Amino acid sequence: MSTRPLPARDKLTLCFAHVAYRLGERFALRAVGMHWIEVRSLEALKARIGEADVLLCSGLWRNELIAAAPRLAFIQSISAGTDQYSRESLGAAGIRLASAQGVNERAVAEHAIALILALARRIPEARDNQAARHWRGMIGDIGQREDELGGKTLLIVGLGRIGARLATLAKAFDMRVVATRREPSRGAGAADEVVGEEDLRGLLPQADFVALTCPLTPETENLIDAKALAAMKPSACLINVARGKVVNEPALIEALAQQRIAGAALDCVWEEPLPATSALWGMPNVLITPHTAGETRRYEDNVIDLLLENLERLWRGEVVLKNQVV
């Protein structure tokens, strides 16, 4: 692939494009002597993309921007997911692309374990009771009480960086951890057992919690469908910190409504923001967080670290970027 040249440091223009992240503010603290601009809307990005040699972007990206970006040589994605970028179009234009894979592995894994704890310890119910000024009495029905994680089985679907970190956290709670991985031969890490993706159905009946940490690919879209949900224990819970379309949402809603599984904690859904009409909002056995698993106070700095490393590689003429996609 013939790639566009990257200007020297003092001739370079960076463009930070995100609706909320404070990338420019954090980048300015580095005092690295590079010119930058920041935009917070698609309209502003369209107006200024022609000035950019390097773009940091995620949700604002549209592939038609390529035609308006004659100087653009490199895109550092702000997110780990890069399905919004056309690899074919970027390659044809000579534009390099790297993902932000790994910058939020600790954050997402911690969020996943927090969701597991919240469901096991019935924290959403406690918060609702607090809002209602209701002191819940002791519960005689054992099945309705808070639970412990020790001895429970966690199934991690996708033992990549996030999944591996989640496995380590789960072992600290004395959980049994089983996992799927595209290449099981690469090792199990902290997991007690790891199998290929094709063996997922065999693990589902064992799991008390099923945590999705896999990327969205043609193979993983609708991976958790009606058949997969039917294979889970009625007492099991689904945790999704991956992508919404990994789960067949109508099938999940039906399984939750009919109590074929005990609950779900969802950081991502099919359509974001989740429409007000979605049945998920009103389900007492569902906990929703607004795709914030990877969003921490360190996120911008982690992305900037990755950006600076890749810029140095490009200036040195290296062929391989960190987290290279194109």
Image: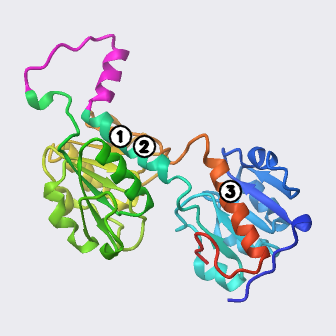
Q: Name the N-terminal-most of marks 3 and 1.
A: 1
Q: Which of marks 3 and 1 is in front?
A: 3
Instruction: Please state which amino acid type lies under the numbered disc 1.
Output: Leu
Q: Name the N-terminal-most of marks 2 and 3.
A: 2
Would you identify the image quadrant in which residue 191 lies?
Answer: bottom left
Quadrant the C terminus occupies: bottom right
**Residue drawn where x is 81% and y is 69% of the image:** 53
Magenta region, residue range: 121-141
**Residue drawn where x is 55% and y is 45% of the image:** 295
Q: In the picture provided, is 102 more to the left or to the right than 258?
A: right
Q: Is mark 1 on a helix, strand or loop?
A: helix
Q: Is mark 3 on a helix, strand or loop?
A: helix
Q: Is residue 147 above or below residue 304?
A: above
Instruction: Tell me if label 2 and label 1 are in contact, CB under 8 Å.
Output: yes
Instruction: Please state which amino acid type lies under the numbered disc 3.
Output: Asp
Q: Pointer 3: what residue?
A: 305
Q: Pointer 1: what residue?
A: 115
Instruction: Please state which amino acid type lies under the numbered disc 2.
Output: His
Q: In the picture provided, is 218 more to the left or to the right than 157?
A: right
Q: Which of marks 2 and 3 is in front?
A: 3
